[in-house]
Image (cartoon, rainbow, N blue to C red):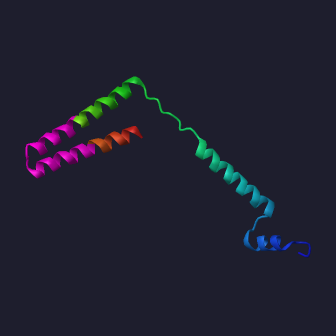
Amino acid sequence: MPGQSVVDKIHAAIYPYPLCCVKRLFEVAHDIKNVKGNAVKAKHVRPGLEKRALVVRLRRIKGQVEAIEKMVEADTDCSDVLMQVVSARRALKSFSEEMI
């Protein structure tokens, strides 16, 4: 078009949208980025029994890890120790899935 500036012509070649719309999209994207950076994470409050069950589960896992430590100190066979490590890892994975 004869009345277009060079910037408008370049813009029209690159973007299929009018320049005013593209500028607004960038402004909105910038605002969203700022909100995400300053947003406070929502705190998930669990009911008492559910929380208690998670704590009990963690204590059981802690006991497993302490038992593994004692097995290492007692020079227990490597395969037995590794079996307990696998068990503790599964318990932690299960715990993390429950947290989600």
Q: Which quadrant, please, contains the N terminus? A: bottom right
User: Which of 52/39 is in front?
Assistant: 39
Q: Residue at x 20, y 47 (%)?
A: 85
Q: Residue at x 14, y 47 (%)?
A: 81
Report whether 100 appears left or right of 15: left
Q: Work out which residue is located at the far top of the displayed protein and give it.
A: 48
Residue 45 higher or lower than 68, as above or below: above
Q: Examine the structure image and report whether residue 58 is included in the region drawn in magenta.
A: no
Q: Which quadrant, please, contains the C terminus? A: top left
Count of numbered circles in the view: 0
Residue 21: horizontal and vertical position, in percent? 77, 59
Residue 7 position by quadrant: bottom right
Residue 6 higher or lower than 99, as above or below: below
Q: Main secondary structure of the magenta part?
A: helix
User: Which of 99/68 is in front?
Assistant: 68
Residue 32: horizontal and vertical position, in percent? 65, 49
User: Which of 15/38 is in front?
Assistant: 38
Q: Where does the magenta region start and end?
A: 63-90
Residue 23: horizontal and vertical position, in percent? 76, 59
Q: Residue at x 27, y 41 (%)?
A: 91
Q: Residue at x 21, y 40 (%)?
A: 65
